[in-house]
Each structure stands twice: as C-alpha cells, then as structure tokens.
Image (cartoon, coloured by chain):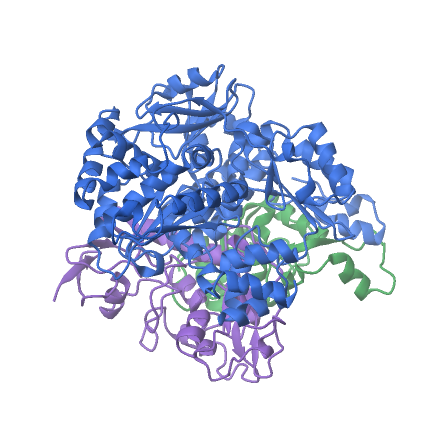
Chain colours: A blue, B purple, C green
C-alpha cells in the first residue's frame, strides 16, 4: 500500500481511532493483508500504541496478519452447508487449484479455508472470496471459480451472476409484506412527542428480537433517563448465529423500516448519531445500505432537522464487522464500534447508561427496529393484539436444513414448532435446532411447543434435521463453532470450548467412553456456571440437548472399554518409525 | 456500615467495593488470580466465582450490596474453582520445577489452596517461544495465564503500553509493543510496575535467579490468602 | 500404628523420570522399617524384579516418552489394584515434556550422526505424555519430587484404607 493511499484512507476516516476496524478492513482490501509495517504505520498516524492495532488485527478472523493470497477463499462451515456437500466441494476446489486446505499455495496466490456460517443457509453451500459471498455452490460453480482463479481474473470482473443472493421469502406477514414509502412510519412517530411515542411502544409490549427478549420500551426509557451529554442508537446487524439469515433479507427488503425505527428511537431518547453494525459476511449489503442512507439524507429523513423538526438532528453510519460472532453480544459490538477487540464488557454498568463511548446507548436488533416502525404505523395496541400475551407481534424465522422449502417464514409469535415444520415441508424430522447452536435442540415430543418468549424463545434460526442425519455430527459442528468463536477473555470459555470440542471429536472418532461423556458434562457445567458472557454460557447447549434428549444417539457411538488413551499411541510412534526406518513388532504399540 | 453475608458470616463493606474486595478486607480469602488491589476488576480468570441467590457470578465484578447472601466455601464452588485452575494449567506449559517464580506464584498457591493435585484435563502443550532479547528481562510466555495485569500496569501506571493481547480464543496471546515482536524494542524498563505485577513466572528479571531458596518462599511458608501470616 | 493383617504388595517403577521420586521415598529414613512392616515389594528398581505380579498398589514415577514406558505402564495397570502417579513427570509430563514443541525426528537427527534402528531401543513417542493420558490413574501425588513427608503421609493413609490427605506444605508442584 502506497503512503499516499494510506494517507487518503486515514483522511477519509478522520484519523479517528474508533474507526480502526474500518481502517484495517479497507487497508487490507488494498494491501491484501495487514503486514507488521502496515500496523506500525496505522498506529503512528492514529496516535495509538502499535500493540493495540496489532491486537485488533489479530482478533477478527477476516483480518490476515500473514499473507493469504490474492484470492482468499473461505467455505461457510455451517452444518447446513455440510449437509449440502460443502466438504467435498472444498476439497475438490483445493485439488483443482493445487492448494493444501488452510495453507497458502507456494506461489502465494490463493488459499482455501473455512469460516463460520455465512448466513446463506437456505441457498448453501456458500463461500466467500475476499469476503464476497457466492451461494448455491455445485460442481459447475466450483469449476468456474477454479478457472477464474487459475487465470487470475480480477475479482471485480467475475460474472455478476455468481454473486446473486436470493431473498427466499416463503411466508409474508405484516413485516416482510409491508409496502410503505421511506419515512412514512417515521412521520407517524414524529407526529407524537417522544414521550407519547414511548407510551405507544410500551403499549405494544415489543420485546427485543436478538434473543434475550428485553422490553424495548424499558430499554429506551432507561437510555432516555440516563445522564449524559449525548446518546446513541445502534442497530445490531451482526447476524452471526448459525442458521439465522432473516436480518440479511430485512436489510435488503425493508431497510427503510429499519432506519425509520432507528430514527424514531433517536427521536424518543434524544440521540444525534446512530450506527448500523453489519457483519462482514454481509458485505454485499454495504453498497445498498450506503445508497439508502444517502437517499434518506437527500429526502431529509436523516441529517439536520429531520422531516422539518427543528433541532432534531440524526444521522447513521455503517460499520462492517470482520468475522467475529462474539460481536453480536451488545457490549462486544460496542467495543468493536470503538475500534477495539470485540471483548464483552463487565456489567454493570449496562449499555443503556454506559454504551458507545460510555454514553447512554440503545442497541437493538434489525428486526426490533423494523417492528418499531410497524408500531409507529399501526399503533401499540394493534401490535400487542398479535401474538401471545407476553410475546407480541410477529417473528421472522430463518428456516433451513432438511425441508422442501427453506427460506423466511413470518408467523405470529406463539406459532407451534409443528406449524412451521408443516409450512416448510419437513418430512419426518427427527429434531429441530431453534435459535441456533446457542438455542435448543427439540425432539419430536416437543413439536407442539410454541415459538415465543413464554415457551421456546428464538433468535430466529430454525434448522430441521431429517431422519437420516446423525445428530452427533451436528453437535460436533457446533462445538467447533464455539471453540473457533470464543473471544478468549475468560478461562472457562477460552479453554473449555476447545476441550469440549476434543471430547466430542473423540466420541465422533469412536475413541470416546463414558468417562468422556462425564468430562463433557463437567466442562458444560463450568461453561454454564462461570463464563463471562452468553457465548460461554450457551456453548454447552448442543451437547447438553443431545445428552438429555437423544441419549441413545450418543451412547451408541461410545467405546465399550473402560478407558481409551487420549491419543493414538501407535500413531505417536510413526515419526520415530519414519526416521529410524523400523517397522518391527517393537516399533508398534497396540492402541488400547 | 452496610453488610452482606459470606457463608453465613457478616461482611461489612463500603460503597463501591466489590464482594471480593470486601471479603478480602474482612479476612476471607476467596481464591482469585486476575484481581489485584491496585487495579480495576478484570473478571477474566473466574476463579473468584461465588454463588449469590442461586446464581454463579465472579465476585470481583459484583458490586457489594446490603443483604446479599454469598456462598463461597462450598464443595460445588471448590470443584468449579479446581476445574478453572486445571484449565489454566493445561492451557500453558507450567513446569514448576524449572521456574524461578515457583513458591511465589499465585497460580501454584491457588492450586495448593484448592488441593489441586493434577491438571486432570489433556495437556495442550502449546508452542510458545521464550523472548530473551531484553538485556535485563526475560519473557516466558509458556506460563502466561492472560490476566492482563502487565497490560494494565504498563498502560495505567507506567504509561508505556509495552504489552497487549492479540489473537482470539485459545490462540489469544500476550504481545509486546514493537514491530519486531521483541521486548528489547519496547520502552519497557526493569523498574516498571508491569514487570513486578505478573502473578506467575512470565516476566522475570535476568541475573536474579533463586535469591530466596526453594522451600523458603512465600507459599512454601504460608497458604494463599495468609501471606506473611502463620498458616 | 496398627499394622494391617497381611502385608500389601507394592510395585514401583521409574519411567521418563530421574529416580528423584524414588530417592525421596528413601528419604523417609528410619520410617522405611515401619513401611516394610506393612508392605512387600514386588517389581521395583529396589528389588530388580523384571515383571509385576498381582499387586495392591503401584507407584509410578516419570511420564511417558517412549514405547517401553507405555508397555510398563500397561503392565502396572493390569497388575495393580490401585495405581498412583508419583511426581511432576508422572502427573503432567514434567521437564521431559519440554521437548513437546520440537519434532521428534529433528531431535533424533540432532542427537545421532546415524539414527540407530536397533529393535532393542525403545522408539520415542512424538510427544511426552502424563500417565493419565494412557491408563486410568487412581491417585496423583505431585512434586518434584514429592517431599518425603508427603510420600509417608500419602502411603500410610492409603495402606490404612483412608483417602490420602495432603495439607499445606505437603502439596507442591516444585
């Protein structure tokens, strides 16, 4: 990267260290990777310690602190991608390109690895090339990608149809089906005083759609009442929970509802600035969101005196993440927005009083803000009339896995699991994962349970497992996911997720015993009881669900032996056999 | 003065104290590693986890409040804390017999206090090269428990930002503030607080080996929480 | 001390260790006589018996660095009702495990001008392991070596059927 290019980039970001994640992302786009001298340069110009920049570069998995080639291919490694053959396609691409999985090819041009779920589950398998998504992979597409890379075709000139992402809306409700002009909902909100709109919101009984289900009105009221010279509105679009992709579609189809909701929040709590924190995997949404923001500024829906309300100034900036599931946790997201490693903060204090730059901040999910716009349009009572007493409104479910029609289904809160299974055409499912790996695995006995906060809360993911699937594969995949995504701050999650992953790998490899199950239970308790944040608390859920509800599936994979070594003892002699040239009886050990 | 109960004992506290601070001040040695009286609570090691109203929570980040019923010396918590200490042992390479910090090491002392006799979990045996580049200091990353006390001390007390963390999850690791990655190229000084604050044997002064013989060191003589007192 | 009715059979071995733990056992000094009232030694460096008969108790010093270590450990596990990992190396691999970040091929090539291929030489494992990675271990006695007092306390507790207690000063990792 030339000094002039870096200078221009830093100028664009006003030499603001809170924009460090954006600066590194854009610098990597130009330079290919974040080299030690580049880190030194950036740190020097921003006036922050070099080690801080290195620490941020080392945290996010999309940042390369080693060369990764002109073409960095990452296959989405969600269990649904695997169901659709992603493993074979990945190895095929590797062999067509002559690259070893996970390694940079000798000529330094290309690497092929894996990444956590890219949120294209209903049109998988998917991959990212230099963070640009390509869905619906098959042999033909893999051959095409291999050819484009082999001929060093510049990425911007690759055929556009490769990058087409479908919206896959299967069942519309009043949110997915809304057809309103930009600012229409906001106009209704601004016709009320901030206090009056907050009252409508309270009447609506809206609860956050990110998973925890906190009352939106209470959150806004706390932020409104918290002392502070300024306030912020943050839209959490870091949709990282494997199996969830509803926000991807809402941001494309109903972006103005989301932005109307954010602006109504700013009006209510008295904020001047807002952010959309978009996961790096959704980079294909960057341009459309920027375009929508520009259009809204032009239409006076953002900027000074919004919709002519003198003194109501509000604007929204787009931030992209860089591959870190933990940033979906609101305080980790705020750290990332401030240009730091995405480590969840200690609480109290909470973001409503000490959020972005330690000012009162509302952080809400994409679907929550879109629901706020519906409340502005239809009123709090109308919203509360839909759903159940404690879960008002509708819920957009991201359905994937073994069903005829994967995609988005908007249903009133409280719909049964069975209703959704019927709608999506699932045949004899043996289980459903609701809410992603951090959620819960439901057995057929539970299919009459209802999808709402009173019964089975959900962050929006609904993954169907047909009768032929091995649920241990699912649990192993999720264990790898958590070990990869642990931020590493606290001991139980940093080390425990890896040890849990190894216990389950041992069981998967037929080397597991009852003792390994006991160990996995102990690690699960430690994760649940002593982790710093929700990631660690829930990292044990897939295993615990399997243990509690599908014990035979687990037990039939266990060795009958009392003890199996933690490693293959004969394999451990292979290196010495090689260098001594021996293969006699004493050069081997029985495995058990 | 307001108070809460710890295992049935009244513990007085002043406004702003954490449960851990108040308990330590009252002579109840809740085991802990990343907490330090000179620094803001960190909450990363989780060894000080207690149970409050049926909920597990780190006592270092829990504000003391009147009427809390805190459990600490229970079998359940002992087992949890043993497990956490064991996780720290298997994560690094802790070869106590060859460590100059042995007998002064808080990780050891907490292990002794909790009757931890084995790391229990499979050892991860990471590859963590030693940095001996600095003329007066040595950095042995094998023993790092990622408490960030050196990071915090160098930033907040020494004003040098000589240390930081990079990586994520199990690959999280201590780094120094230099493009070469070597301690000799940082501004760290042998007199820095960051150098002495390490609870384990990562940051050591060269030429100072074994001035106090093994067997006569702090935790040879006293248990964790009873330093300088009769056990 | 009340002697049990029958002498208990005890076997000991030093695997990837330095015999320091055995030396520490000898450091219980004149209490060795009291100990021998309670036990009869089977396979042990102290008896020079080459194989282990059925035993009540096995004490193993040292970790696992080669194929022979694994075979001896398995013989002990088959023969001993109760198996104890004695000392740092048995408990966590100890100092020999400091080679674990190296490739064992490079180690052999660095040490030998011509790497020997004699079947009598045990092949090294790619990594040094604690005993508990290969067999079930009943008790762990840490220390490098465990102090003589700890060994005495531990053994007398075990031989009298009590769960071994190690108070402050007896549990050591160095």
Q: Give the left or right position of residue A376, taking residue B1 as reference.
A: right
> What residue is shown at x 84% (from left), y 49% (from top)?
A582
Q: Quarter-wise, where is residue A192 in the image?
A: top left
* Residue B71 location (% of width, % of height): 25, 53
Residue situated in front as seen by the camera: A577 or B21: B21
Residue situated in front as seen by the camera: A512 or A246: A246
Asked whether residue A244 appears in the rendered view, the answer is no
Asked whether residue B74 appears in the rendered view, the answer is yes
Residue situated in front as seen by the camera: A509 or A401: A401
* Residue B107 location (% of width, % of height): 44, 65
Q: Give the left or right position of residue C10, taking residue B63 as reference.
A: right
Q: Residue furthest right?
A: C114
Q: Give the left or right position of residue A551, taking residue B9 as reference.
A: right
Q: Residue furthest left?
A: B1
Q: Is residue B223 above or below residue A352?
A: below
> What residue is shown at x 39% (from left), y 29% (from top)?
A396
* Residue C115 location (% of width, % of height): 85, 59
> What residue is shown at x 55% (from left), y 58% (from top)?
A24
Q: Quarter-wise, where is residue A545 in the image?
A: top left
* Residue A380 location (% of width, % of height): 21, 32
Quarter of the image with the C terminus of chain B is bottom left
Q: Is residue A381 above or below residue B192?
A: above
Q: Give the left or right position of residue B5, taking residue A288 as reference.
A: left
Quarter of the image with the N terminus of chain B is bottom left
Q: How many marks?
A: 0
Residue situated in front as seen by the camera: A303 or C151: A303
């Amino acid at each position: 990267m030339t000094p002039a290019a870096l200078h221009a980039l830093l100028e664009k970001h006003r030499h603001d260290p809170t924009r460090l994640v954006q600066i590194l992302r854009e610098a990597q786009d130009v330079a290919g990777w974040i080299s030690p001298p580049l880190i030194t340069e950036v740190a020097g110009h921003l006036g922050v310690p070099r080690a801080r920049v290195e620490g941020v570069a080392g945290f996010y998995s999309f940042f390369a602190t080693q060369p990764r080639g002109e073409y960095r291919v990452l296959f989405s490694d969600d269990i649904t991608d695997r169901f659709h053959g992603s493993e074979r396609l990945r190895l095929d691409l590797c062999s067509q390109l002559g690259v070893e999985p996970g390694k940079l090819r000798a000529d330094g041009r290309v690497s092929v690895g894996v990444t956590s779920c890219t949120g294209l589950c209903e049109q998988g398998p998917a991959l990212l090339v230099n963070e640009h998504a390509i869905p619906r992979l098959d042999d033909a597409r893999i051959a095409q990608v291999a050819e484009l890379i082999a001929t060093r075709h510049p990425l911007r000139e690759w055929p556009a149809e490769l990058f087409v992402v479908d919206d896959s809306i299967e069942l519309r409700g009043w949110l997915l089906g809304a057809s309103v002009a930009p600012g229409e909902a906001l106009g209704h909100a601004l016709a009320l005083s901030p206090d009056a709109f907050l009252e409508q919101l309270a009447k609506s009984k809206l609860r956050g759609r990110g998973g925890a289900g906190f009352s939106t009105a209470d959150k806004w009221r706390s932020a409104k009442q918290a002392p502070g010279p300024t306030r912020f509105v943050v839209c959490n679009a870091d949709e990282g929970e494997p199996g969830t992709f509803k926000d991807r579609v809402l941001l494309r189809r109903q972006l103005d509802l989301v932005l109307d909701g954010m602006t109504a929040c700013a009006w209510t709590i008295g904020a001047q600035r807002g952010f959309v924190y978009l996961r790096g995997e959704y980079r294909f949404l960057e341009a459309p969101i920027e375009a929508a923001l520009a259009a809204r500024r032009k239409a006076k829906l953002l900027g000074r005196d919004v919709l002519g309300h003198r003194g109501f100034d509000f604007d929204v900036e787009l931030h992209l993440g860089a591959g870190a599931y933990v940033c979906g946790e609101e305080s980790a997201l705020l750290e990332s927005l401030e240009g730091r490693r995405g480590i969840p903060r200690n609480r109290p204090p909470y973001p409503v009083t000490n959020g972005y730059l330690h000012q009162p901040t509302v952080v809400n999910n994409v679907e929550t803000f879109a629901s706020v716009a519906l409340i502005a349009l239809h009123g709090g009572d109308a919203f509360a009339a839909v759903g159940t007493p404690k879960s008002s409104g509708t819920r957009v479910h991201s359905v994937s896995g073994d069903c005829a029609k994967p995609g988005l289904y908007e249903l009133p809160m409280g719909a049964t699991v069975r209703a959704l299974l019927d709608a999506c055409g699932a045949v004899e499912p043996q289980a459903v994962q609701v809410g992603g790996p951090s959620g819960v695995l439901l057995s057929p006995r539970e299919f009459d349970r209802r999808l709402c906060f009173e019964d089975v809360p959900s962050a929006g993911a609904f993954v169907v497992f047909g009768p032929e699937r091995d649920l241990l594969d699912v649990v192993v995949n999720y264990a790898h996911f958590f070990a990869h995504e642990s931020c590493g701050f606290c001991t139980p999650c940093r080390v425990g997720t890896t040890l849990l992953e190894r216990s389950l790998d041992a069981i998967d490899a037929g080397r597991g015993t009852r003792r390994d199950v006991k160990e996995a239970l102990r690690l699960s308790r430690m994760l649940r009881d002593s982790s710093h944040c929700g990631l660690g608390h829930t990292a044990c859920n897939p295993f615990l669900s399997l243990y509690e509800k599908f014990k035979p599936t687990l037990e039939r994979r266990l060795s009958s032996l009392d003890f199996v070594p933690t490693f293959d003892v004969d394999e451990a002699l292979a290196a010495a056999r090689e260098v001594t040239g021996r293969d006699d009886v004493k050069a081997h050990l029985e495995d058990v | 003065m307001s108070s809460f109960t710890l295992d049935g004992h009244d513990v007085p506290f002043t406004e702003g104290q954490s449960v851990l601070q108040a308990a330590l001040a009252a002579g109840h040695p809740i085991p802990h590693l990343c907490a330090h009286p000179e620094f803001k609570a960190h909450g990363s090691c989780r060894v000080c986890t207690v149970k409050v109203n049926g909920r597990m929570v780190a006592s270092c980040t829990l504000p003391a409040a009147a009427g809390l019923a805190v459990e600490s010396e229970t079998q359940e918590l002992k087992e949890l804390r043993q497990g956490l200490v064991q996780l720290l042992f298997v994560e690094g390479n802790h070869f106590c017999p060859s460590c100059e910090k042995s007998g002064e090491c808080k990780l050891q002392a907490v292990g002794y206090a909790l009757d931890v006799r084995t790391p229990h979990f499979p050892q991860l045996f990471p590859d963590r090269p030693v940095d001996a580049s600095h003329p007066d200091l040595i950095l042995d990353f094998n023993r790092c428990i990622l408490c960030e006390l050196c990071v915090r001390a160098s930033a907040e007390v020494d004003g040098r930002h000589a240390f930081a963390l990079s990586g994520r999850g199990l690959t999280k690791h201590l780094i120094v503030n230099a493009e070469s990655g070597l301690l000799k190229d940082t501004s760290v000084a042998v007199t820095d607080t960051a150098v002495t604050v390490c609870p384990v044997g990562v940051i050591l002064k060269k030429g100072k080996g074994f001035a106090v013989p093994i067997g006569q060191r702090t935790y040879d003589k006293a248990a964790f929480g009873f330093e300088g007192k009769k056990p | 001390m009340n002697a049990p009715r029958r002498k208990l059979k005890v076997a000991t071995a030093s695997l990837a260790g330095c015999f320091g733990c055995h030396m520490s056992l000898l450091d219980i000094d004149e209490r060795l006589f009291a100990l021998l009232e309670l036990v009869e030694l089977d396979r042990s460096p102290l008896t020079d018996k080459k194989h282990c008969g059925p035993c009540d108790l096995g004490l193993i010093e040292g970790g696992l660095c080669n194929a022979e270590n694994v075979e001896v450990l398995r013989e002990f596990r088959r023969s001993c009702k109760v198996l104890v990992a004695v000392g740092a190396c048995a408990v966590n691999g100890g100092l020999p495990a400091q080679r674990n970040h190296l490739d064992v091929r490079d180690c052999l090539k660095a040490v030998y001008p011509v790497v020997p291929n004699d079947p009598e030489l045990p092949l090294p494992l790619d990594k040094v392991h604690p005993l508990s990675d290969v067999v079930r271990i009943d008790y762990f006695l840490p220390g490098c070596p465990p102090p003589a007092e700890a060994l005495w306390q531990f053994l007398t507790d075990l031989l009298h059927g009590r769960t071994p207690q190690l108070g402050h000063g007896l549990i050591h990792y160095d």
